[in-house]
Amino acid sequence: MLRQISLGTIGLSIGGILTIVGFVAYAANNATLNLVGFFYGFPLLLGGLALKANELKPISYSQTTTESVLLLRQQQATVTQNKIRKDITRYCYGQNAHLDGALSYLGLSPSDEDRPIVTGLREIETNGAYTLILEFDSPEIPVSDWQQKQEKMTKYFGPGVEIKITQVGEDKIELALITLSQEPIAQSNRQ
């Protein structure tokens, strides 16, 4: 819940209130409230402005996750799937775009202008496996470039996931991270 709250907005709100209280206290000749307003309110206000200027809003779900998929997530989701889901559904600060580091590493972000942008995500079931789907707006990077990087993506987002890349519209790409079955791994460990 805390990750859904903008720290910039909190800083602006509290800082703004304390600063106004400081000005009113100054006019009313109340030295104690004046000091509180100026020494706490003004820095909070400036901090809130700085955070707001570098704020990256959370990505929203494009469809509601069903109870059965939530249960699958609890049972099957990999650490990487959970980390990606949590990272892009919260406020971030000091980043240019969600997953900008991963896209750069994968060679899908030659420049800030050409970088694909995450526009949504959803969680579904694929043949009994938990699947996290990331939706991208990718006008500069064609699906063929994405598909050339599929093996590198599998290594980057793995282990335990299969990558599926789909073009769903002009300039729209979906990247599915499908959890692999855990049974073959357990059986190979017993042998």
Image (cartoon, helix red, strand yellow):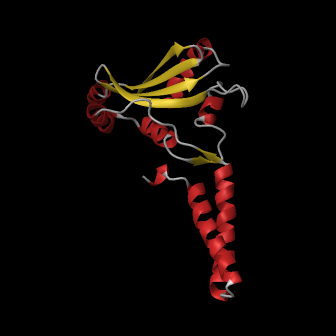
**Front one among 117 and 40:** 40
User: Can the viewer see residue 158 in this picture?
Assistant: no
Q: Is residue 98 left or right of residue 29?
A: left
Quarter assignment of residue 11: bottom right
Which residue appears farthest toward the top when viewing the image?
Answer: 144
State the quadrant of the C terminus: top left
**Front one among 167 and 76:** 167
Instruction: Please tell me whether residue 49 is drawn above or below residue 59 in the rendered image.
Output: below
- Residue at (62%, 75%) from the top-left corner? 21
Estimate the x, y position of residue 75 in percent, counting from the top left: 29, 36
- Residue at (68%, 57%) from the top-left corner? 49
Estimate the x, y position of residue 27 in percent, counting from the top left: 70, 82
Q: Is residue 42 left or right of residue 81?
A: right
Which residue appears farthest toward the front when viewing the image?
Answer: 28
User: Can the viewer see residue 127 in this picture?
Assistant: yes
**Front one among 28 and 144:** 28
Estimate the x, y position of residue 63 in percent, counting from the top left: 40, 30
Estimate the x, y position of residue 34 in percent, counting from the top left: 67, 82
**Front one among 31 and 80:** 31
Instruction: Please tell me whether residue 137 is drawn above or below residue 85 in the rendered image.
Output: above
Instruction: Please tell me whether residue 55 is drawn above or below residue 189 in the rendered image.
Output: below
- Residue at (53%, 14%) from the top-left corner? 169
